[in-house]
């Protein structure tokens, strides 16, 4: 989920049988929740949610980080190919869980169902908070770049960011159908632009002149190293993050057994093609040393293609990337506490859904939390800390698949993980390696995350007291 920009760097720059058309109401302590999620989403929404959530402004700068760590053309391209392969392996495993548990709420559903309420509590709360922080970061990026076109734009950036969150909240409030169309339309425009930019560069045979002195001063010298490869792969895998997007809406998909796997594989394939076009375009225009020399190579590429207006073009592209990423992030964030409320791990009022199928209470809560992050400016630290929980969620989900295969071997599986158990094991090991890398490279934030994990249990017990007493 690469929402980051030069102003807001990635924290790893060092990252859910046929059902009725309407889901049954969630029962909580004998009471039925108000409203129902509508089972109306199809494959194209799933693909759009993944593409919209995965591709953000970060892809405009991540190629530079990878080139610095892998300063050879072969190593640079191979890293991006391996990142796409790893994402596809993850999809092959988690799509099975999404089909087995077609309930909106993301990986919280897997953790709670397989490992119990406390595991679900940790995954759910960390996912919700970090998603809201990501929404705040995206809106700030969009506001910052939009401010360049507005007098005194820098001074009103927070106000612009607040306005962006409120506008999208109002659009998403109307219902799941209009929300889905919004996500699909913005994602389509994003795809056209991101595919069109490299194609124009290739057609025009554009080459940029990069000063040798600048390159020598900034490019990592020497041969490929293991540490460099690890650092590069962390940045690449984080860039591909977002391929679980459709799992947050599993309970709203028309035909989970068919649409979830196809959406996930289609989404990852789309992201892979777009990323390869972009990274190869940067390499084609700037060369490997030129990509490594500039922390924001997209600006150099845009200038090489469009001349003096290149800066304006790249600002507009970054704004588009942010605007198309924000709706799916906000929608995903709202589904997590909705699912938690159905299990008594979030206030019961969070189960309110309007006639259009929008969980309005959790949509409002998610937007308010994002606004709080904007006002206080604390979203960057929250996301850096959340990197630990992001990886933990993946490891738990892969573990859940192993557990379910042993616990319920005869359970009907309309979709079975391709290559299981080898592919799942590779994904699990990759997640563990990634987690270790996060702990080693960002010890301060990782220590805070572990402390939060320990502190979660007494908070969980306090929240469970009324339910246990009943």
Image: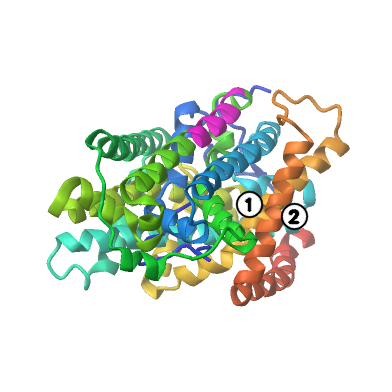
Q: In the picture shown, does residue 158 fall above or below 246?
A: below
| Residue, far bottom | 444
Circle 1/circle 2 CB separation < 8 Å: no
Query: Dot 2, crowdedness within 10 Å: few (<14), some or many (≥20)?
Result: many
Element class at badge 2 = helix
In percent of width and height, residue 110 lies at: 70, 45
Magenta span of residues: 258-269
Snapshot quadrant of residue 78: top right
Lateral position of residue 292 relative to residue 408, left or right: left
Q: Is residue 381 above or below residue 387?
A: below
Tell me: 12 left or right of 138.
right
Mark 1 vs 2, N-terminal side: 2
Q: Residue 465, how many percent across, how many down?
A: 74, 65
Percent position of residue 24, x then y: 62, 33
Residue indicated by mark 2: 117
In the foreground, 21 or 266: 266
In the image, 445: left or right of 324?
A: right
| Most foreground residue, 457 or 445 | 445
Name the main secondary structure of what is drawn in magenta.
helix
> Whole-Å distance between the Cαs marked 1 and 2?
9 Å
Write down the residue under mark 1: 340
Residue 180: horizontal and vertical position, in percent?
41, 35
Question: Is residue 22 one of those drawn in magenta?
Answer: no
Secondary structure of the residue carrying tag 1 is: helix
Residue 240 seen from this side:
yes
């Amino acid at each position: 989920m690469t929402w980051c920009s030069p102003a807001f760097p990635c924290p790893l720059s060092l990252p859910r049988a046929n059902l009725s058309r309407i889901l049954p109401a969630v029962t909580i302590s004998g009471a039925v929740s108000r409203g129902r999620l509508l089972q109306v989403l199809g494959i194209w929404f799933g693909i759009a949610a993944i593409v919209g959530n995965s591709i953000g402004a970060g892809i405009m700068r991540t190629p530079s980080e990878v080139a610095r760590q892998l300063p050879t053309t072969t190593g640079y391209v191979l890293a991006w190919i391996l990142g796409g392969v790893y994402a596809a392996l993850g999809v092959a495993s988690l799509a099975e869980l999404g089909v087995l548990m077609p309930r909106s709420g993301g990986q919280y559903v897997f953790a709670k169902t397989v490992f119990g309420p406390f595991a679900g509590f940790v995954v759910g709360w960390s996912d919700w908070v970090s998603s809201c922080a990501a929404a705040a970061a995206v809106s700030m990026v969009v506001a910052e770049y939009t401010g360049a076109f507005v007098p005194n734009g820098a001074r009103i950036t927070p106000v612009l960011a607040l306005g962006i969150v409120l506008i999208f909240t109002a659009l998403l409030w109307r219902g799941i159908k209009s929300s889905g169309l919004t996500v699909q339309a913005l994602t389509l425009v994003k795809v056209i632009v991101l595919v069109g930019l490299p194609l124009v560069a290739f057609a025009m045979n554009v080459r940029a002149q990069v000063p040798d002195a600048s390159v020598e001063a900034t490019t990592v010298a020497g041969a490929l190293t293991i540490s460099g490869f690890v650092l590069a792969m962390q940045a690449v895998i984080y860039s591909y993050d977002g391929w679980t997007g459709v799992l947050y809406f599993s309970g709203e998909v028309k035909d989970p057994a068919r649409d979830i796997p196809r959406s996930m594989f289609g989404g990852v394939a789309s992201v892979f093609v777009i990323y390869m076009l972009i990274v190869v375009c940067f390499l084609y225009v700037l060369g490997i040393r030129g990509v490594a020399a500039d922390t924001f190579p997209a600006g150099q590429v845009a200038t090489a293609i469009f001349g003096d207006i290149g800066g304006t073009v790249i600002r507009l592209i970054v704004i588009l990337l942010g605007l198309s990423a924000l709706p799916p992030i906000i929608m995903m964030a709202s589904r997590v506490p909705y699912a938690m409320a159905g299990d008594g791990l979030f206030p019961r009022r969070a189960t309110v859904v309007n006639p259009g199928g929008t969980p309005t209470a959790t949509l409002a809560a998610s937007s308010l939390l994002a606004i709080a992050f904007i006002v206080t400016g604390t979203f960057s630290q929250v996301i850096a800390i959340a990197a630990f929980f992001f990886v933990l969620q993946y490891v738990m989900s892969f573990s859940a698949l192993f557990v379910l295969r042993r616990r319920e071997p005869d359970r009907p599986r309309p979709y079975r993980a391709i290559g299981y158990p080898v592919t799942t094991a590779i994904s699990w090991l990759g997640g563990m390696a990634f987690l270790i890398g996060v702990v080693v490279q960002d010890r301060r934030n990782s220590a805070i995350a572990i402390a939060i994990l320990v502190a979660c249990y007494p908070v969980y017990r306090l929240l469970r007291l009324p339910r246990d007493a009943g």
